[in-house]
Amino acid sequence: MKCPHCRNKTFIRSSEEISNLTRKQYYQCSNIFCGHTFTAMQSISETIVPSAIPDPKVNIPISPYSRHAKKV
């Protein structure tokens, strides 16, 4: 991810699990003159190929572009 201010590369300095589908990530800009530090959320949004050992408590929608999507 690029810094939203100076557009330089950023690095994930730390992260924490919010749920089994979401992580909060802490980013730091690589430009020492900018120094912007910020958080972003990363979450799983779609399944492209289903798991071979699915957890029945996890519900991730199938991507419409997946070959496993049901055709209507």
Image (cartoon, grey):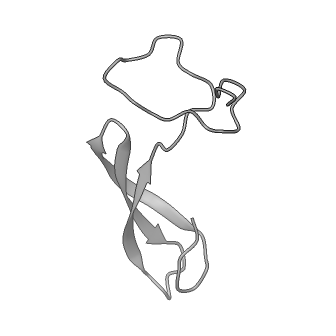
Left/right placement of residue 10 relative to residue 42 reads right
Left/right placement of residue 44 relative to residue 71 reads left
Corner quadrant of residue 58: top left
Q: Position of residue 21 (x, y in %)?
A: 37, 39
**Which one is nearer the viewer's eye here, 56 or 10?**
56
Please say if 27 is above or below 18: below
Q: Position of residue 29 (x, y in %)?
A: 49, 74
Please say if 14 is above or below 9: above
Q: Residue at x 49, y 44 (%)?
A: 45
Corner quadrant of residue 22: top left
Corner quadrant of residue 25: bottom left
For the N terminus, give its image quadrant: bottom right
Which residue is the extreme one toward the front? 72
Which residue is the extreme one toward the top? 53
Q: How many marks?
A: 0
Q: Position of residue 41 (x, y in %)?
A: 39, 57
Q: Position of residue 8 (x, y in %)?
A: 61, 76
Q: Residue at x 47, y 42 (%)?
A: 44
For the C terminus, give its image quadrant: top right
Q: Residue at x 53, y 76 (%)?
A: 3
